[in-house]
Image (cartoon, helix red, strand yellow):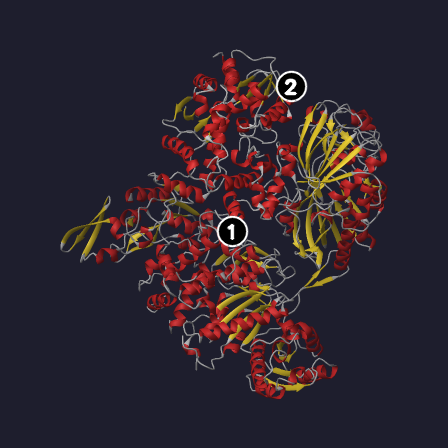
Amino acid sequence: MTVSYYPGCTLKTKAKNLDLYARKCAEALGIALEEIPEWQCCGGCYPVAKDEIATKLSSVRALAAAKEKGQTLVTVCSACHNVIKRVNHDMQTDEEIRDKVNRYRAPDEPYEGETNVLHYIEMLRDLVGFDKIKEKVVNPLAGKKIAAYYGCLLLRPGKVMAFDNPENPSILEDFIRALGAEPVLYPARNECCGGYLTLEDPEIPKKRSETVLQSAQNHGAEVVTTACPLCLYNLQKNGGSEIPVVYITELLAEALGLK
Amino acid sequence: MEQNNFKETVLRISGVNPKKCMRCGKCSGACPNYDEMEFHPHQFVSMVENGEIEKLMTSPSVYKCLTCFACVERCPRQVEPAKLIEAVRLCVIRQAGQNHLKPDQIPEMLDEDLPQQAIVSAFRKFTK
Amino acid sequence: MQEVIKQKAIELLSSGKADRVLGWKEGEFFYDITPAVFTDVKEIEEKFVYNAFCGPNFSKYLVAESRKDGKIAVFLKPCDTYSFQQLLKEHRILRDKVYAVGIPCDGMVDIEKIRQKKIKGITGVTEAGEVLQIDTIYGKKEVAKKDVLAERCENCKSKKHVVYDELIGEEGDVLDSHRFDLVEKIEAMSEEERFAFWQNELSRCIRCNACRNVCPACTCEKCVFDNPASGIDQKAAADSFEEKMFHIIRAFHVAGRCTDCGECSRVCPQNIPLHLLNRKFIKDINEFYGEYQAGADMETRAPLTDYQTDDCEPSVILTKGDQ
Amino acid sequence: MQRIGVFVCWCGSNIAATVDVKKVAETLGKEPCVVYYENYQYMCSEEGQNKIINAIHEHKLSGIVICSCSPRMHEATFRRTAQKAGLNPYMVEIANIREQCSWIHKDMATATEKAIILGRAAIAKVHLNTPLQAGESPVVKRALVIGGGIAGIQTALDIADAGFEVDIVEKKPTIGGKMSQIDKTFPTLDCSACILTPKMVDVAQNEKIHIYSYSEVAAVKGFVGNFDVTIKRKARYVKEELCTGCGACTEKCPQKKVPNDFNLGLDNKHAIYIPFAQAVPKVATIDPDYCMMLKTGKCGVCSKVCAAGAIDYKQQDELVQQQYGAIVVATGYNPIDLKNYDEFAYSQSPDVVTSLEFERLTNAAGPTGGVLLRPSDRQHPHTIVFVQCVGSRESGEGCGKTYCSKICCMYTAKHAMLTREKYPDTEVYVFYIDVRTPGKNFDEFYRRAVEEYGVHYIKGMVGKVSPENGKLMVQASDLLDNKQLKIEADLVVLAAAIEPDPSARPLATMLTTQMDTNDFFTEAHPKLRPVESATAGIFLSGCCQGPKDIPETVSQASACAAKVIGLLAKDKLLGNPCVAESNELMCNGCSSCEKVCPYGAISYVDKEFKMPNRTIAVRRVANVNPAVCQGCGACTVACPSGAMDLKGFSNSQIMAEVDAICK
Amino acid sequence: MQVEKNFEPTVVAFCCNWCSYAGADLSGNNRIQYPANVKIIRIPCSCRLNPMFILRAFQRGADGVILCGCHPGDCHYTSGNYFARRRMTLLFSMLSFLGIEKERCRVEWVSAAEGAKFAATMNDFVATITRLGENKKLEDLRCKK
């Protein structure tokens, strides 16, 4: 199966591991990631205001490109995922935004939110299947207690992202179980890491990230995993703990024997 | 942007109807960055409704919202306070010369591990 | 296609799957196609036709036919299936007495439109793809089929069969039609223009009742217009009130039940665009109460036997204003 | 041909001052078929009525028109007058020339002219009147109560007390409902079981009451006074008539790991069980999902130990048919499922409980024997946080309910107060949006919780509950102090919204009663007929109609019983004769009328018709049940063929009035 | 349109028995005036009003027809006025489509407590009809002897 792949800016630079293993593992699991040609940066965070049109265009371009190929659009960075899925939702439901965007782009065929947007982990669950991953694991991460860190971007707003139960998600835990490790459930897994505020005032992300890692460790975590480069940065840099924080694709690659 | 039109602008670009709020405070109960904020999510709702936009615009609180959407997710009346905060912030930075983040400030903020994502996000949030 | 359908008719009859077959045969002229009930194979072989003039919608005949002994097979074009299903929904047709065969349709031709192209002395029409070859006493002529389609087929709403026992050919889709364009045009006129328009149209009515007689929604055991007790049973179109009264009441009686099959306008000897009245109601229903297509399914409540507590008020008409 | 009499009333000067009554009478006297006319000062007086009676006799009148005050005032009076004179009461028409003429016009000529027109319209109508006979139907003197909670119990007891037979259908093995699970009742704090169980015993011992426990209503046919109900008695694998309730079977049953639904799954029960000690009927029931004998055929211990020989593993569901004159719905409520409120960690931590679970945790007959212990480690909680309005008062776009669940403020105050009383070392926080305590002694009760018991009431809502280090970290806002609180709690109690029992909706369909979008039954009138449904003969008791506390439920239950008794006390029901009637010859059987009927009064029958050519055709035609029809006329307009007409307001009558007015 | 000086329109008001007829009575009880042009026909519920009756009224020379019923949600029969509302909306729309003056028909919800509203509604409606003048587009000339 071939899907359109949107890596995003960070995966090309600071988060190469997230990208590299995403590609390797997908290939091993029988999914071809076809990078969207000439994709543009999604802007990092979803433009919430109803009158923001230009800032939504890069996402719409990627979405329309996937539509043209009739492919599902897969992202792995949580931020890109949040932006693109929400813009797609706007294109499906907000007539005004849809109309303005389409007028602006003036494509042959207007884009109306037809593309199916999946996060890499959703792709693993829905297109590959965790059972099949389990079969393909050569290095089970047995005995490892791994805490999944969702953050805010994958889950909220719950109705739009439709990713998992936003208050008590289980998809990453199921994934960790499929890799042979033991998932650690801790309440801060859907709390925010402090995000981009790190640029201006690292004190805030520090408090947030410490809370997250402390909660994970309280519940016995040995490793924390995330899909977001900024979360990873904040947890590592500001989390005040030596606990390793890794990308989900790294875990997957390790278990599949690709690392 | 005319001063007395701020409320209308905030309501328009946020798409939020603050009248739906029943003053339960769950947003502020949910907010992870509550302690850093001068005005809290529930106050944004009531102050916008009362037209006290300038007070909010001059408060550093507008730059403290993490846009994590916990308040939106848990609001029992679908008021969506985060969208109001965003709209108030936009009222500030869309004014001439009011960008909160300037390019020449960036280099000193960087460290080698900082992902691009943080910079583009901050730029989108803090500049016109 | 005619051959395939004819063979199906023969098969249904000879296999005993059906005791009678409802199909088309030529009337006085080749373009004057009428419904016919076939009971023997030979008759089918000789007379059964299916061509671009087979406009008649059989649904209504099934009200009586399905009450006779034995089973009747019927051929239904996509739009006919809507009428058929609507009648099933209203318990007018006994479903198990009917064997419905869905057949494809790529539009029926209006002989008047051919004539309007200054083609005279027509003796026969043959379909050749997109083109119609016309035999006339003055020799052969050709017209593009799309130019002479009946109005209702120009604005075809659906190529999908909503109910059938068996389907011949491939299933089509519900279409985006422009069927409300003319209604919109009339709505955009001034009040006086609208009045003049309809005065002109309806004053031609001769009260022949053909529209009612052909209408698949008009299957009442006793029509109010034939019932002296109803208080509106006048037979002749005595004056302008009478014409309007008849057509308003008829449109209202079929509102929410009319599938927009267009038979009323097809049979009107005075060429009054009666379907516009029905379409006006359909358009209003769609706008006011949400999209509704009569006959599209068995479950959805008809709009006039349903309500929402937040429906619009009748005063909405006042504010709609003349554009 | 009618012989019509016209009687014009002066109403003292009320009419006569602005309407020339003599002229009206004389003018109307010239109308076709009017054979008698008269005007008089007070038509409604005894003298006036005698004039009418005499005229009917003398002039052999077949219909009369009274030009007088509003029919809403004296129509009934004049109908009785006609009846006294041997004239069918429905041969009377009133022209309202007072409220709608003399009182609103000043000019005599105008008012007189209008009075004449109104009189003409009434004459035109009476021309077409036909004598109507109100239908009669017998009343089965037995009531069915669906649901055996406090609402059903109270209604049944009151009906039985008036001497009528009552059956209670309860889907659980025992009656008692939610009240049997509750520990104490507000605002008096008396023990729930102490006041409920005597009533349950009364029910059991009342000769007029029969309990179908572990049973459901399977089908309902018929109409007011004459319902035909099928009751499904589910197999309990124990012969009810033999079981003595000794409990030996439960004691010996080896399957002990069955979640105890009576204790909301907080502990386990045996596969054969009696829900609680005071159950009525006190009969054991086998849970077929857990019983080894029923699942594998191996065990049979209960059968061996049962001295009464009551165990019957081969028992089947059984259908019982019964007739009733009235049906009472008392299906009650449930707390909503909190699966969509994981921010409060309900599914993540056993120490986050609902208020009903809290009741069980404090109940002496509950899983902890009445000692408040938290479920996770059976330790005494020192800090308890109560969260109000969980799932209530939401916008409706989310997962919660739009209404206020009404009872939570008071029971939370009760819980908080009782906790502080029994365990003074416990800190109790209540997070509220508004405290709503309308009710006798209710606000005083809440204030006592705050002032005497030191419960911390905080205006604000909890945003998140995080289980950390064996505690529950509660993050919440305090709106009055404008700060965010972080409380380390041992137990969190959620006041879950309440919703109607899921059995209510299918039941409403069976009963053809209406429900609102929240699945609460709709009362016939929100103010004036609060315990009746719009469907005649169906009554509403308790929370099935809307959230209620116990005192309110009981008063509604008794009110409901009064309505039922009023119905059952009649031998025959007289209907409103102005009902719809279908002309079978014209009916298409299209079901349009049935769809708009709010009462389910229309059904369809296949009927044979003789056709002209001596054949017989079978057609589906509408049939109006006159006992159920209320005469609104919605069907008459929905009917495309005009087969449906309304007696007393027929198409031709109304059109005759139109003609008379527009002439 | 030229309005005749002493044109007195004929207005038929269909009133449901439970709310609007009682509202009209209340208006009388309180002696609130409205024009005598209005003649009320009592029907059990607004849903009893067949569009045929309205056409009949116009045919026989009515210049305006108004339907009054219980407020939506307050119907004595719970749902009657909801059906009436749909029927009248469609009928009025059709009359307008045919070029009939759309102000000639109206629906107003008047409760039993709204005597003043009933009178005000009738005053306004009669004024509107007087302004519109005689119903020419929908009358049946035969009925005008």
Q: Are marks 1 and 2 in one subunit?
A: no
Cα distance, mark 1 to mark 2?
58 Å
Residue underneath mark 2:
A217
In the displayed structure, does residue B56 sit left or right of residue D216?
left
In the rendered structure, the residue with mark 2 lies on which chain? A
Q: x, y (%) of residue C308? A: 55, 53
Q: Nearer the viewer, mark 1 or mark 2?
A: 2
In the displayed structure, does residue C134 sit left or right of residue A44?
left
In the displayed structure, does residue D333 sit left or right of residue D442?
left
Element carrying mark 2: helix
A143 and B78: which is toward the camera: B78
Disc on res. D259 = none
| Residue in view at x 53 percent, y 69 percent | E66
Mark 2 burial class by Cα count in 10 Å: few <14, some 14-19, many 20+: many
Q: x, y (%) of residue B43? A: 62, 42
Q: For the residue marked with disc 2, what is the amino acid?
A: Gln
Q: For the residue marked with disc 1, what is the amino acid?
A: Arg
Residue B50 appearing in the image? yes
| Residue in view at x 47 percent, y 68 percent | E103
Residue underneath mark 1:
C301
Q: x, y (%) of residue A210? A: 62, 23
Residue most toward the left? C138
C167 and D442: which is toward the camera: D442
Residue D232 appearing in the image? no
The quadrant the N terminus of chain D occupies is bottom right
Mark 1 burial class by Cα count in 10 Å: few <14, some 14-19, many 20+: some
